Amino acid sequence: MVEFSTPLLVEIERSRNLNDLFADRVAADPDGVVIEHKTQQDGPWIPLTGRELDAEVVAVAKGLVARGVEPGDRVGIMSRTRYEWSLLDWATWAAGAIPVPLYETSSAEQVNWILSDSDVSVLVVESTAHAAVAQEARTGLTGLREVLVIDEGAVETLVSAGADVPDDEIARRRGLAELASVATVIYTSGTTGRPKGVELTHGNFYELTVNAVEGLREVVSEPGSRTLLFMPLAHVFARFIHVLCMPAGAVLGHSPDTRTLLDDLASFRPTFILAVPRVFEKVYNGAEQKAAAGGKGSIFQRAAKTSIVYSRALDTPRGPSPWLRLQHKVADVLVLHRLRALLGGQAKWAISGGAPLGERLGHFYRGVGLKVLEGYGLTETTAPATVNRPARTKIGTVGKPLPGTAVRIADDGEIEIKGIQVFQGYHNNDAATQESMHDGWFRTGDLGSLDDEGYLRITGRKKEIIVTAGGKNVAPAVLEDRLRGHPLISQVVVVGDQRPFIGALVTLDPEGVPGWLTAHGKPEMTLAQAAQDPDVLASIDKAVDRANKAVSRAESIRKYRILDTDLTIANGYLTPKLSVKRNVVLKDFEGEIDALYDGPVGGAE
């Protein structure tokens, strides 16, 4: 087996917990700003110092105690990403309890399962709509005592209820947990079956964040460092950053509505951001279409190409030539600086995870001036296990193991991880826990390779490997990730298991199609009409041809079929972290898949 490890940089006393991490930040700079938040969408960012945030955390923790929450109890949080989410998280830990996040898009069935399996006693939701879902889900939930609604004064209710709880009780509870104690149970969104509850400890978050700060100090811990969270805090990636801001000394903000994200970025002005690749694709495609609609499409294309070529040249021994540097400066003046402005104007770093970003976008954004550090991890690894470093980034890889982490490649190509961030086990599911481990290493289910410097490259999902009728093994992610970058395309599912060749199901992007049509001088049309338009099909044909260049002939897409509906969270085909529920798609679109293999090979079906 190929193996690579990075030594631990910071060791933590086993008796400490996340409340100590919080207390250290407050003690180090009680009057320094920790969080900025808004009380209304178009209002100003209001700073909260460490001292002020601590007082609010204690007040809410007292309310949880007054409402009967005991040490070790589970408290559910179901909300969009907003200040109250972070407040409730830290307050639940201060009360000695265990937060259980729920995606705000969860169905009643999913809510029922999570609340039941984790035995949540108090649930805090954001809105009356969420409360209605919770009410529908309460069947059989004898342990759920009450549901509080943030928009109806949940925080104020808790503060009022805890007025008589002594400070000493919160101080006592804050010291109960140790590094080995369970800090949270995060339910994997899952592409198959019921979600599994991942038990992450105080040590998983504490040790990982302080060591990640040491490894990424230039990104997250320079004077003035600040980040705006817009990914769901129910996802481990955002939760990790939310905790990391404490030891990093960074200022944290929250943006709950993607419709106002650009406004929030402009006013908050983060120095580093985190996002999934789909966000970077949307920003690129939106900028391209806006330029085309304004008659500047060719200028944008030249600038984008220059940005990519310039970035690639940075990785060569001699670097960019003087002529290329001049071209890049012109491209920056004409186009690239506008993209930096979209992100607030002072973002220098981005951390990308959740899916492969792709070399093209990685080089494009670095050429723009935003250095994207692509990383890799899972819920079971408390988010990151590997990440590229500022001093040495290899675009196209997901970086080296973080301090305290070891990565190895099993004989069958599966990535296995051991380290400070690996979870304790699945809640109430010993069989699944044992199945996920191999000689003390966590089996990720992903396929990859390590180079001689320890940089990891993801090549596919072990369980998603397609075996054609001819016996060829095909990793669909390589093709899917490349095609999803096209402005016309929303989702792609590559198929072909036990079939004579590889095909694909494609959905059109409801947001991308109108801009593409305008940019190409075409009239407005419905998605159904666009799916039949010769120019649209020709553009997708070219995208398929480009994607096929990354694989062998036997692995290439020979036919594709455009579905009449997109794959979304709402219709049950995407998980909350935007992963395709492949098994559901294959089942529900079996007829469309069969149709791919009828008739001649080649192009759209």
Image (cartoon, grey):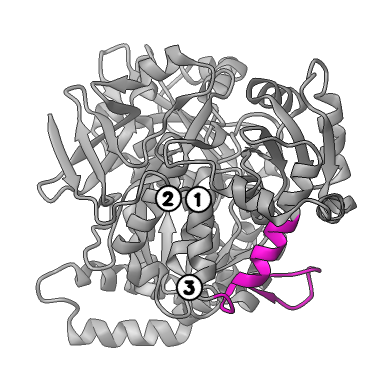
Q: Quadrant of residue 435 in the image?
A: top left
Residue placed under numbered mark 1 in the picture: 18
Of residue 462 and residue 432, the one placed in the foreground of this image is 432
Name the image quarter holding the N terminus. top left
> Mark 1 and 3 residues: CB-CB less than 8 Å, in contact?
no
Instruction: Tell me if residue 58 comes above or below residue 484 in the rendering.
Output: below
Magenta stretch, residue numbers? 30-59
**How far apart, in angstroms, are the residues tagged by discs 1 and 3?**
16 Å
Q: Where residue 58 appears, x then y in whole percent?
A: 69, 57
User: Which residue appears at 75% of the width and 43% of the height?
Assistant: 65
Of the residues under marks 2 and 3, which one precedes in the sequence? 3
Q: Where residue 415 appears, x then y in whole percent?
A: 27, 32
Residue placed under numbered mark 2 in the picture: 206
User: Which residue appears at 68% of the width and 72% of the height?
Assistant: 263
Of the residues under marks 1 and 3, which one precedes in the sequence? 1
**How far apart, in angstroms, are the residues tagged by discs 2 and 3?**
17 Å
Image depth: mark 2 or mark 3 in front: 3
Of the residues shown, which amino acid type is indicated by label 1?
A: Leu
User: Which residue appears at 32% of the width and 11% of the height?
Assistant: 469
